[in-house]
Image (cartoon, helix red, strand yellow):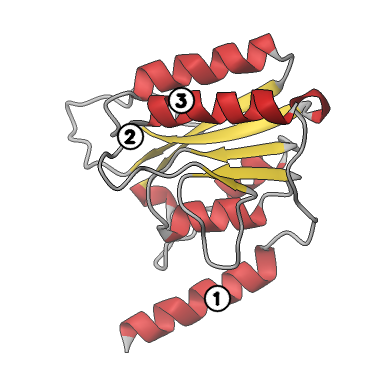
Amino acid sequence: MFEFIKDFARKQALKKYASKEPTGITPIEQIRSAVAFINVEDTSFDLCKDAILAFYREHGIKGEIFFFDFRKIGSEERLITSITTTVLRRDLNWFGRPNREKIDLMLNTNADLFISLIKGTEFPIEFMAKCSRAKFKIGREQLPGGTFDLVVADSPEKAFSQAEVFREIKKYLAKIG
């Protein structure tokens, strides 16, 4: 019963917040701003973050990186990312929607490009991807409703790190432009 209620709440939230903006593959020359989502639990987290920032600089893109950090952090541990752009477990409501502050911060970037390097289709990344008004959306796994315009998935033989997936995304973006 609880799962039914949770699914109902998720559908209602997506109905209310989902962007109505049309999306499609866009050449890199037309991208002025971007937002990327990465998981701090991935072993290539630092390498990936640096690669994304270098990509933004190289292409003159005003960009932000948001971090998903759902680890249990003890009192003696410190957060390794900015609290402003990090979505923590405590930032999610009872059905998994990020809090309004994080949503507004992402939306205020007015991103032309949305990149999700988060593996899986969990509700927090689904919500952020669907409510983003970006005109070009890239992800690792297609979400229900065909949210992403470009999907760079793991191969059946090997699961790739976020840094490896981002390297492939850059190759595709170069071919599009």
Image spot of residue 28 (x, y percent): 74, 26
Question: What distance separates the C-alpha of mark 2 from that of mark 1?
Answer: 30 Å
Residue under pointer 2: 160
51 left or right, relative to 68: right
Sequence order check: which comes first, mark 2 or mark 1? 1
- Quadrant (top left, top right, bottom left, bottom right) of the N terminus: bottom left
Report whether 136 appears left or right of 75. Answer: right
Neighbourhood count class around disc 1 (C-alpha, 10 Å): few under 14, some 14–19, many 20 upward: few
Q: Percent x, y for residue 139?
A: 52, 45
Residue type, label 1: Lys
Depth order, front residue of 171/78 = 171
Name the disc covering residue 2, or none: none
Name the mark nearer the viewer: 3 or 2. 2
Q: Nearer the viewer, residue 56 or 110?
A: 56
- Amino acid of disc 3: Ser
**Up/down of 163 relative to 18, above or below:** above
Q: Mark 1 = which residue?
A: 11
Q: Give neighbour class at mark 3: few <14, some 14-19, many 20+ (Cα, 10 Å).
A: few
Which residue is under mark 3? Answer: 82
Residue 79: percent from the left, percent from the top? 32, 27
The spot of residue 149 in percent (x, y) is: 65, 49
**Residue located 59% across and 42% down the image:** 138
In the rendered structure, which amino acid carries the disc numbered 2?
Answer: Phe
> Residue 98: in sight, yes or no?
no
**Alpha carbon distance from label 3 to label 2:** 25 Å
First in sequence, mark 3 or 2: give its number: 3
